Every structure is written in structure tokens, then in C-alpha cells.
Image (spheres, rainbow, N blue to C red):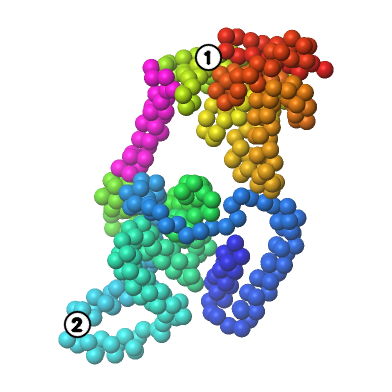
Amino acid sequence: YQLVIASALAIGEYARRRRIDLPGILSFGVRLVAIYLLSTLLWQPFVSNFATAYLSVQMWDGARTTLSEYLTVHGIFLFVIATWLVWQTFDTKSQRGPFRYLRLVIARSKRLDRVLALQRLFAAPPTPYEDLSAVIVLAALVLEGVLVIAQMPVFVLAFPLLVLAGLLVLRPDLDPARRLIALLIAAGLALTLMVELITYKGDIGRMNTVFKFYLQAWVFFGIAAAVGLAFMVQTKDHQRQTDDGRRRTEGAPVLSSVIRPSSSVLPFWWWGIFALLGFAGLLYPVTAAHAKVNDRFVPGSPPGLNGMDYMRTAVYQDGNHLLPLEYDREAIDWLRANIQGSPVILEGNAPLYRWGSRISIYTGLPTVIGWDWHEKQQRSIIDGAIIDNRVATVQTIYNTLDPQTALDAMKHFRVQYIYVGDLERAYYNAAGLAKFDTMAQAGLLQIVYQNDHVKIYKIMP
């Protein structure tokens, strides 16, 4: 973060002064120190109380993104972005001059000494930016060759675009709006390349690293592509208006916008490719929605907006146990209709991505423990042993044969209702579960709901 701030300050100061001198360096230093001191002071309360499970990164040594995968995710944006970068970099008077000079050198190679003499006589000396650009381009060409040899296709594609964006950010004569577009492009490209090299330590593969940083890159690319395309259209339209005005002055025919519509600001083939890419991208919500609607727990079950309807026919297999979900659905419906407030309900704990925590999920009632690893991730400021203790406590309550031990543990967590269904029978001892009926007969508990597979007990005062 501090490196980004320092870079932005340095670029801004150079763009404002158009040179590197001692007053500019001092101005940059004063602003950087002020931002550092103020941000440290104002953010100290947050930093002092912040904790997360992911505090470090490590080098990623697994499979990298393929070029087809990269283009599938970012291709539509990159097509517009690459066009804008090339147009903004080379379609200027200052950039067209060197190309015309190079063509002249090739055409008049037999009189090269005369051409070079004329160039020294008429051409202005190179600016610091032009010298820096030449060095960066030469270094980038060498590095691009290394990337090709190393067979890193994503880098081969994205790195040249990153170099062009970086040069535009540094260009002194670039207006602020275009500089912002270039900065957004550079930031997005840098993020997509970063996740090819590093990942959060403790991540599952690099799943969270990729999709969270890709979301930011999508925002950067989306803004840059939309505004960049608008600039290209606007610039060509402005040039058309200028040409038409000149023709009117000279008495020549005017080529109206009816003959040359705005869609012709770029070559026809470019718009054809862009339309094809856009059409391909728009296929996703149609095909994905259809696939999602037909992705049923039980094949052939009718679609609908009720997220619990699948339980009517679904049977969940957990190890060697088959859990018909209809009985949980009936009990959940009863809880939603009859329980007032937010009493704590005890339910069985299961490994991640299983049927565990289903009562708290579908009713919103608090429970003793949810998915343990997710709880550790989201509450990483506390000792993970606290989560493990809750998991062990739930197991003790269900398995113990001593009613008083179970009551004491439930009192500690303010449990008011106990849920015993097929999942609890799959994970806990039958003898331990049977004690709840004994406690109900003794008046310690009351059975408030039951069906063929589920019983819900309420702890009596």
C-alpha cells in the first residue's frame, strides 16, 4: 500500500513539474512523510485490533493459469484495453514522427549520412521521458524473450500491455483522465500476474487468492475498457467534425455521420470481433442460469423459488448413513412457525461441507458451534482452541450417559432446545442419545416436537 502511494506521488509530481529537480524531490518527500505519519496515527486503533488467519504469503508452485483460461475470464476487457493502449501509445504526433523517420531511413538508406545530419539539425533533443521509455522498452523486450522461453503464456500476453500502461502513466503530456485509465489497467494487469507467483499461506490451493484479486481486476478492467472505448469513439467523432467544418469552409462535400456512423471509428473488422466477443460473453448468463436451474439435488425435481423443496425427496449420504431430508424439513418448518425470539438450539456437528449446522442455517437460530474451520477463519483473533472446545462439548452432551453433565454443559452455552435427528444418530452414540428420553420422563426435558425421525426437546426451568 505504501509503495503504491509513493509511486503515485512521484508520478504526480513528475507530471506536474515535467522534470526532476531538487524542489520536486523535496515536495515529494514532504508529502510522503506527511501521509505516512497521518495514516499511521489515524489507522492505529484499527491496526491494533485487527487479526486475520491469512497474514503471510508464499510462492505459488502449483499449476498456473493457462492462456485459454485467462482469456475466458478477461478476454473481452483485454481486447478493448489492448486496442486503447496501442492507440494511445502510437496514434499521436510525437509517436508517429519516429515511425515516419524510420520509414525514411529505410527508403533513403543509401543517403543515410544526409538523413542523420538532417535529423540532428531539425529534431529536438530527446526528453528524459523518451530516454527512460527507450530503456524500459529494451529491457521489456529482453524479459519478454525470457518469458517465451520459460513458457509462461499469461505473462507473455499481459506483460507487454503492462509495460505500455506503465509508460502512459509516466508520460508527462498525458491528461489526467487518460492517465487514470492507464493506471487502472496497470493495476489490474499487475493483480492478475501477482496471483501467478504468490498465494496466501494457508489457502486451499490458491482459490481465495485468485477469485478475490480477480474481482478487483474485473472492476479495474471494466472501468478502463468502457471509458477507453468512449475516448476512442469521441476522438474520432471530434476529428470528423473538424474535417466536415473544413470542407464546409472550402465548399467541398460534407461526409455526414449518416454515411459514416459512430460504429466506424475503428475498423469494421475490429467491431466485428468485439461484437463476437460480446455475444460470447452474454451467452454465459443464459446458459449458466439454465444449467443452475437444472442442477437439482434429485434429478427431475421441479424448479422453484423455495430453497427447501428439494428436501421433500432428497436423501443425503454421509459415509454409510442415508439421511432422508424430509424429516428435517418438517422439523425446520415447525421451528420457523413456533419458536419465538432467538433461543440457542443444540444440534450435531459435522465436518465441513456436510449436512451439519442445517438447523441454524435454515432457521437463523443460534447454535453452539457451526462449521469449525470457517468459525476459526472468521474469528481468527481468538484462540482456535475455543472452537475445538465447543466441538468437543457438543460431542460430550450427546454422548455422555450422565444427565447432569449434559445439563451443566448446556447451561454454560444457554441452550434451550435440543435437536436429535438422523444426523445426530449418524455421529453420536445411541446410548447417549437415549438419555434425552429418560430426562424427559424425569421432567428435566419436554418433547415439544417429534416425527418419525426427529425429536426436539426443550430444557425445563
Which residue sits at x=31%, y=85%? 119
Q: Quadrant of residue 420?
A: top right
Which residue sits at x=38%, y=28%? 291
Query: Which numbered mark, 2 or 1, is in the foreground of this view?
Result: 1
Residue 87 visible in the current orientation: no
Question: Where does label 2 land, which residue?
Answer: 108
Q: Nearer the viewer, residue 241 or 106?
A: 106
- SS category of the residue bearing label 1: helix
Q: Nearer the viewer, residue 127 or 305?
A: 305
Which residue sits at x=63%, y=50%? 52
| Left or right: 80 in relation to 107 | right
Three-letter amino acid code at the position of disc 2:
Arg
Q: Position of residue 251 (x, y in %)?
A: 30, 59
Magenta-tinted stretch: 276-300
Q: Position of residue 13 (x, y in %)?
A: 58, 72
Outermost residue to the left? 110
Whether 294 is among the magenta residues is yes
In this rendering, the answer to whether 350 lies above or below 83 is above
Which residue sits at x=61%, y=65%? 2
Q: Nearer the viewer, residue 345 or 184?
A: 345
Give me the C-alpha separation between circle 2 and circle 1. 86 Å
Q: Position of residue 103 (x, y in %)?
A: 24, 75
Circle number at residue 326: 1
| Left or right: 63 in relation to 321 | left
Whether 165 is among the magenta residues is no
Q: Position of residue 402 (x, y in %)?
A: 73, 23
Task: Count neighbours of disc 1 (C-alpha within 10 A) and say few if under 14, some if 14 to 19, many if 20 or more.
Answer: some
In this rendering, the answer to whether 231 lies above or below 287 is below
